[in-house]
Amino acid sequence: MRSQDIKFVKNFENHVKQTIHKYKLLTKKDKVLVACSGGKDSTIVLYILNKFGYKPEALIIDLEIGKWSDENLENLKYNIMTRNGVFGNLQGKDIPLHVISPREIFGTSVCYLKSLAKENAGITSCMICGVMKKWLLNKKARELNATKIATGHNMDDEAQNLILNMLKGNPEMCANLGPMTGKIKDKLFVDRIKPLYFTPEADIRRYSELMGFKIQYDRCPCSVDGYRKEIRAMLNELEKKHPGIKENLVKNLAAVKKVRTPMRYKKLIGNGTRKSGNESILYCESCGEPARNRTCRLCQILACIKGDSQNKL
Ligand code: AMP
Ligand code: ZN
C-alpha cells in the first residue's frame, strides 16, 4: 500500500472508533451480532469490530435473490475465513457465522412474498424486504442472546433516509435514524448500532478496495426505489457544490436526538393499547414481537398479502 493509503486506512479506522466511543455504541461486555449482507459496508463493520476486539458474530439472511445472494454469501464466507480469507491476518479464531433462511421461517421464498406483496397490496419490493430483515434480525439476535445488532448503514444511507422520511411525510421514522436506535428500552428489543453512521460511502468503497475484500459492488437487482435514486443523485450533486452537507444532515439529526427527552420520543412513537414496561413499545398481537401498533409492520404486510386485512398500509 502507498503511504497515503496507509494513512487513509488508519484515519478511517480511527474515525469509526471515535463514533463507537463518542456515542457509546458498544462495550467489550456486549455480545454484538453484525447483520451482514456480504456487501462492503457490513463486511467492514465486521472486520473493524473484530479488529478492535469486540468479538462479533456474523448473521446473514439468505434472501435467495439468485446469483446475487449466492455470491454475497460466498464472499462473506471467503472474507471471514481465518486461514485464507482477508480477515485471516487478524486472529486465529473463526468468526461464528449464522445463516438465516426466510424460506424456512415463512414457508416460502422472499421473491414469492415480494411478488404477492406487489400484486395484492401494491407494496414495493424494498419495503417488504426491509421490514422482514428488521423483524428477523431482532428475533434472531434475541435467540442468540446478542445485546447489540450492528448494521452497515453509512452516512449517505442515513442522509437519504432523513430526506425521504420528511418528503414522504413519515417524520416519526426519523426516530430509527441516528448512530444508535433503541433509545427506548424493551426486553424484546435489541439495540441497533451503526458504526459507519458518520462515514461517507466513497470512503467505505476506497477502504474496502484497499483492504482487498471480496465484494460485489452492484446494488441489489430488486432495488427499484426510484425515489431514493433521485434523492441520492440530488444529495451527491449538492455535496459537490457544498461539500459537507451530508455530514451536516446526519450530525444535526444526531444532535437533535441527543437533546430530545425520552418523553418527546415517546410522543413520536406508537399509539396502540397493549404496552410494554416502558409505555412506548407494544407487542404484536399476532407474532409477539415489539411493535409500534397492535400489529407489527411485518404481520400487517403478511395479512395484506393474504388479503385478510382491512387495514390499508
Ligand atoms: P440495505 O437496507 O440493503 O441498504 O442494508 C442495510 C444494512 O442492513 C446492511 O448494511 C446490513 O447491515 C444489513 N443487511 C442488509 N442485507 C442483509 C442480509 N441479507 N442479511 C443480514 N443483514 C443485512
Ligand atoms: Zn407481528
Image (cartoon, helix red, strand yellow):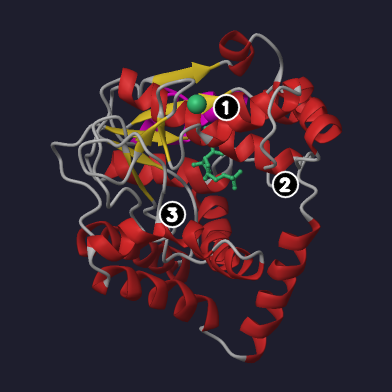
Judging by the rendered image, the residue that carries numbered circle 3 is 176
Q: Say whether residue 219 is magenta.
A: no
Mark 1 vs ligand 2: CB below 8 Å? yes
Which label's residue is closer to the chain start, 1 or 3?
A: 3
Residue 237 pos. (x, y %): 71, 81
Q: Main secondary structure of the magenta part?
A: helix
Mark 2 vs ligand 1: CB below 8 Å? no
Residue 72 pos. (x, y %): 63, 31
Residue 60 pos. (x, y %): 51, 27
Assess disc 2: are there few (<14), some (14-19) or many (≥20) residues with their C-alpha within 10 Å of its C-alpha. few
Q: Is residue 158 visible?
A: yes
Judging by the rendered image, the residue that carries numbered circle 1 is 299
Residue extent of the magenta highlight: 74-89
Residue 15 against residue 103 in the figure, above or below? below
Given residues 187 and 40, the one toward you in this image is: 187
- The quadrant holding residue 222 is top right
Residue 115 against residue 171 in the figure, above or below? above
- The quadrant holding residue 297 is top right
Mark 1 vs mark 3: in front: 1
Query: Quadrant holding ligand 1?
Result: top right
Judging by the rendered image, the residue that carries numbered circle 2 is 219
Q: Residue furthest bottom?
A: 241
Assess disc 3: are there few (<14), some (14-19) or many (≥20) residues with their C-alpha within 10 Å of its C-alpha. some
Horizontally, is 169 left or right of 273 in the view?
Answer: right
Given residues 219 and 90, the one toward you in this image is: 219
Mark 2 vs mark 3: in front: 3
Q: Say whether residue 80 is magenta.
A: yes
Report how far apart the C-alphas of labels 1 and 2 lie in the structure: 27 Å
Report how far apart the C-alphas of labels 2 and 3 lie in the structure: 23 Å
The residue type indicated by label 2 comes to Arg
The residue type indicated by label 3 comes to Asn
CB-based contact (under 8 Å), mark 2 and mark 3: no
